Amino acid sequence: MSEQVELTNPVDLSVGGVYGHIFRRVFHISMFIIPVIFFEFGESFSDSIGYSLAEVVSIVILVAIFGEAIRLKFEFTIFGQREYEAKQVSALAWGGLAIGMVLLLAPIKQYAYPLIFSLSFGDPFMGEIRRMGVETREVIIYSILFVSAIWLVCWYLFATPLWLALIFAPLCVFAEMPRLRYIDDNATMLLIPLVGILILEPFIGLL
């Protein structure tokens, strides 16, 4: 059975207190730029260094894993991280791995943009309304509406199939909900919907 953790005030656990918490949120939101860089500049950059784009993504993932292993070896945290992350894989590392897997396994705009945007914008949204004391039921409702809006924007901008929003907006929200000790919601919020995308892909036919 998965071991769950109690909900605590994230500000109290953040290295740097409230400023560390704000930095963490801003950094989280800024991850929306990753698919922009990938799709707009990725091919030209990878060609310039003599690798395929998939190889570049894999190298970045491997470097991140190695860096996280060193951090865990010396049990240190950086500004904005939680104190408990000194002894477990950080949310940053989980998020980086999950985004990397999306770009490796579903490297098209129609999938990657809504998935990564759901994480970069949806996760902070859910965290902040929880911190305001909103009841779980209302958190779920507001979050599904918010993430659905993200998928609708991606339908308009990137031709993401509209019906996917009906499935994956709620799935992204529910995938973020479990409070697990060693697997951060940055991973579950992306990897669980990614599995769903890959299962449905033969019926969608975009890859």
Image (cartoon, grey):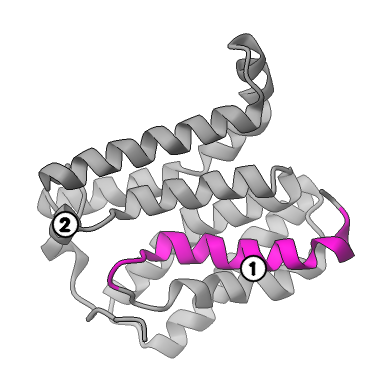
Q: Please say if the residues under marks 2 and 1 sit with CB atoms less than 8 Å apart.
A: no
Residue at 45% over, 60% down:
187
Q: Residue furthest top?
A: 48
Secondary structure at numbered mark 2: helix
Residue at 45% over, 85% down:
138
Label whose residue precedes the other's in the sequence (2 or 1): 2
Q: Nearer the viewer, residue 82 or 23?
A: 82
203 left or right of 104? right
94 left or right of 207? left
Label 2 crowd bin: few (<14), some (14–19), many (20+), radius 10 Å? some
* Image quadrant in which you'd find residue 50: top right
How many numbered marks appear? Answer: 2
Disc 2 to disc 1, C-alpha distance = 35 Å
Residue 30 spot, x, y in % from top left: 43, 41
Residue at 47% over, 66% down:
188
Is 191 contained in the magenta span?
yes
11 left or right of 198? left
The residue segment tinted magenta is 181-205
Residue 79 spot, x, y in % from top left: 17, 43
Q: Is residue 85 above or below residue 177?
A: above
Label 1 crowd bin: few (<14), some (14–19), many (20+), radius 10 Å? many
Q: Which mark is drawn over residue 87?
A: 2
Residue 5 spot, x, y in % from top left: 25, 79
Say which amino acid is labelled 1.
Answer: Ser
Residue 100 spot, x, y in % from top left: 53, 44
Q: Quickly name the residue at label 1.
A: 148
* Image quadrant in which you'd find residue 147: bottom right
Is 25 contained in the magenta span?
no
Say which amino acid is labelled 2.
Answer: Lys
Q: Is residue 68 above or below residue 182?
A: above
Q: Nearer the viewer, residue 125 or 174?
A: 174
